[in-house]
Structures are given as C-alpha cells and as structure tokens.
Amino acid sequence: MKHTYYIIALAIGLFLSSCATEKKESEPDVKAPRFSGYYTLTSIEETPITKQGITFNIESQKRRITGFSGCNSYNAAFTLTKDKLDITDPLSTKKACPAEAMDLEKKVFKNLIKVNRYTLKNGTLTLYNEDQVLFNATSTAL
C-alpha cells in the first residue's frame, strides 16, 4: 500500500513540476518595427543589381518576408532577436524565366538563408552572413 502512495506522490510531483517549467524564448529585438518596410535590392555580394527589380517586403509583426526574386514571387519566415536574424528557406512560385533571371534568383535564395544579421542605416538595409555582405537594399515607398 505504501508503494502505491509513493508512486502516486511521484506522479503528482512530476506533473506539477512540468506545469511550472516555463519555456523561455529569445527576447524580440526592440528595433524590429523599424526593420519593417519595402526594400529594393541594389547589390548581391557587393555586385550591383540594376534591372531585375528584386524586392524584400519585411513585415516584422508577422515575421514574414515577401517579394519578387527577379523571376518569381516568394515568401519566407524569419526570427529576429537582439543579435541574430534567421530566415527560413523561401517558398516561391515556379514560373520559368530566362536563364540569367533564373541564375540570379537561385543566388538570391541561396544567400537569403545564409543571412544571420542586419544593419539599417539611412534607408539602406544590409544583410550579412557574419561579416560578409550578402545584400544591400534601399527602402522604397509602396
């Protein structure tokens, strides 16, 4: 009989301790709202982009990036904390385009998932992998 009480007490103790455990998430970046906006890509890996109209529409509240990759529309989710930016693999439409546009799109998507931090200065958004500049984009009105 004592054995049964110990098992019940142990089960209740485990149950109560699991309820008390709080999952801590990273603190959201207080600068996130100013990160939101519509941006047009000006360079990729410091190579100027002039004619493709590649865009990033960043919605910080929804943690989404949508845009046009030079060939297809895309969207991706992201997480943003004080010191880190992580972007998921983008999902895109599957329209066929000229080879040059498709190659550029592949480069955009490949680099997008490498992004791990950003700076925003004077309307220019710069996305990095560590210290390597992956993208520069300028803020534009919708």
Image (spheres, rainbow, N blue to C red):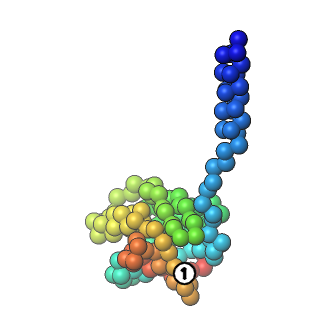
**For the residue labelled by badge 1, is the local secondary structure a helix, a strand or a loop?**
strand
Return the x and y of residue 34 as percentages of the image width and height: 63, 76
User: What quarter of the picture does the N terminus occupy?
Assistant: top right
Q: Which residue is mark 1?
A: 120
Q: Residue furthest top?
A: 1
On screen, 139 above or below 96? Answer: below
Closest to the observer: 68 or 85?
85
Q: Residue at x 66, y 33 (%)?
A: 14
Q: Residue furthest bottom?
A: 122
Return the x and y of residue 19 as percentages of the image width and height: 70, 39
In this rendering, the count of numbered labels is: 1
On screen, 46 above or below 24? Answer: below
Q: Residue at x 66, y 16 (%)?
A: 3
Q: Residue at x 36, y 63 (%)?
A: 110
Is residue 103 shown to the viewer in this render?
yes
Q: For the residue marked with disc 1, what is the amino acid?
A: Leu
Closest to the observer: 10 or 22?
10
Is residue 49 shown to the viewer in this render?
no
On screen, 3 above or below 9? Answer: above
The image quarter containing residue 79 is bottom right
User: What quarter of the picture does the C terminus occupy?
Assistant: bottom right
Return the x and y of residue 115 as percentages of the image width and height: 43, 68
Image-based side of 84 in relation to 10, left or right: left
